[in-house]
Image (spheres, grey):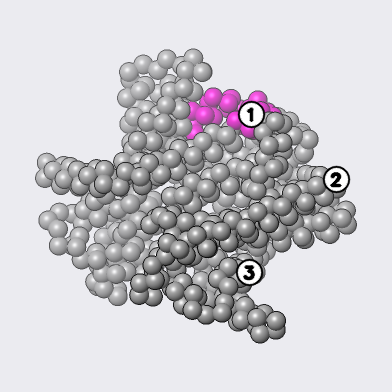
Amino acid sequence: MLHYLKVWLASARYSVIRTLMFRGDFFVWSLVEVFWMAVNLMLISVIYGHTSSIAGWSKYEMMLLVGTSMLIQRFLMGFFWSSIFEIGRNVRSGNFDFFLAQPGNVMFMATTRKLDPDGLINSVVAAGVVAYSAGQLGLHPGFFDLAMYAFLVLCGLVIHYSILVLSISAVFWLTSAQGVEGGYFTMTEFSRLPREAFKGVSNILFVWLLPVVVVSNAPARVLLHGFEWQWALWLAGMAAAWFALAVLTFHRGLRRYASASS
Amino acid sequence: MLASVEKYRQAFLVGIQSNIVYRWNFAVRGFFSLFHLAVVFILWGAAFAGTDRIGGFDLRQTLTYFITLLVLQFFISAFNEDYQISEEIRNGIINQFLLKPINYFLYRFSIFVAARLVSGALVLLPLIVAFPFIKDSLTFPLDGWRLAVGVPALAMSALIQFSIAYCFGMLTFWFLEIQGFVILSMAVEAVLGGQVFPLDLMPDAIFRVARFLPFYYQMYFPGAIITGRIELPQALQGLVIQAGWVGVLLLVNQILWRRGLRRHTAVGG
């Protein structure tokens, strides 16, 4: 475990040094993320300019939900996005050999190699949106609620990570994983909606079968309504199941990898 | 004159062929658009649960607006033209155009038109699949003038979209990496182009300013004409402003091309 922590810290150090070399790039990409977060908040603001409730959620409850969804997404972008996204290209070109030759679990090495500090910086902005909304709602969560919120955000991050690894693993069979990016962002759109808005088929598909709604609704509910063990168990169970599926699929795919032109 | 047209006709035909190669990419994009549409239906359906009208329009009119924009996007939006132009400049591929009697803007525009014809045709497939589920949400006004004004508005919207993408591509003469600028601009275009919410729902003062920006004419303007969100006098006034923006952007394109070429070093290619 300590060995992996050392490897990760070395990768993180390299990523930070690289970012400091391309400061202009860092600034532009940080701005990109802030702009896209602002777009989501503007949508909420405009809709609530014309109505007082969406599926029983008030304006600041929705902002807290959207902030939570953005927080999980920023963590994913910061810690894993670049590394996972590059797997597709590396498998196609044969550069994936580099990870096979490293002394450690291939999935860990390949998905944690690069850190994006711009994503991590913006997680502070997303956390600020959550804190601001909680302030507007007059919420005063205790230490236990905050700890549970952090735990459920972590579970959400595991689910996002697993879905992305599962999607990119298709490259071992298809040799091209184009569209993964668009697919991921489309799926995260659902996590900005309250669970109560889903009815009928959409309820079965997006709430029960795919974990795209529970991933943000469960942590948001901890701050709004206090800890509810059903939601926590549901999300933790989903995180464990999707992570297991991602590990299994990735290693199945790895067996098919035959270096360049595979 | 005929020989000149023939050059770009050939570029158009090559564009059709090369875009058919990427038919699965367009199909996948069309498929994911249906998920985006599901989000729109769920969100706006929940927003309308407590009220009959938002901004003077009912739920069906609002959903029709979003469906129309989603389909139009495949016919008139610039997808990755900025990136393609950027790659051609960075890799020195534009060198060959500097030595031939061909206008680079018209060449790229011919390929853009071909690409949108292919993506527009392919989006009809997921649309047909989704039609039984969305048909009850569709309601279009039947005024004849909307077609007469809508068609030139759509043509100019396509030209504005392409021109903006072309401008971003030209930035490669000055910057090594333009992807950050492009995605930054996408956020602005998505909001001020009316793709996130109908622009008429914004506070009145902001909406009035937005009407004088080019983004308004990228998607919202033709979409609003077709779906009945604006009336004839506003539409005619809008056409004039839109034509003005087309002129301005074409001029900026030419200036950037000429200025950029002065900085260009034709190594390799």
Q: Residues within 10 Å of mark 1 (few under 14, many from 20)?
A: some
Check if mark 3 and mark 2 are on a common chain: yes
Q: Quick one: SS at disc 1?
A: helix
Question: Mark 2, chain letter?
Answer: B
Callouts 3 and 1 close, C-beta under 8 Å:
no
Residue B28 position in % (x across, y down): 52, 63
Depth check, mark 3 against mark 1: the one in front is: 3
According to the image, label 3 marks what residue? B113
Q: Is residue A74 left or right of residue A41?
A: left
Q: Position of residue B203 (x, y in %)?
A: 68, 30
Q: Is residue A242 above or below residue B76?
A: above
Magenta residue check for A46: yes
Q: Residue at x 80, y 52 (%)?
A: B140
Q: Amino acid at mark 2?
A: Pro
Determine if residue A223 is in view: no
Camera-side residue of B259 and B86: B259
Question: In the rendered view, would you say A36 is above or below B136?
Answer: above
Q: Name the residue located 58 percent from the left edge and 40 percent from the top edge.
A: A198
Q: Amino acid at mark 1?
A: Tyr
Where is B109 relative to A20, above or below? below
Tell which tag, 2 or 1, sits nearer the viewer. 2
Q: Quadrant of the N terminus of chain A?
A: top left
Farthest residue, direction front:
B262
| Between A259 and B77, the one nearer to me in the picture | B77
Q: Secondary structure at mark 3?
A: helix
Question: Which element is circle 2 on?
Answer: helix
Q: Which residue is mark 2?
A: B233
Task: Pinpoint residue B186: horizontal percent, then vertical percent.
Answer: 53, 49
Label 3 packing within 10 angstroms: few (<14), some (14-19), many (20+): some
Q: CA distance from mark 3 to mark 2?
A: 30 Å
Residue annotated with mark 1: A48
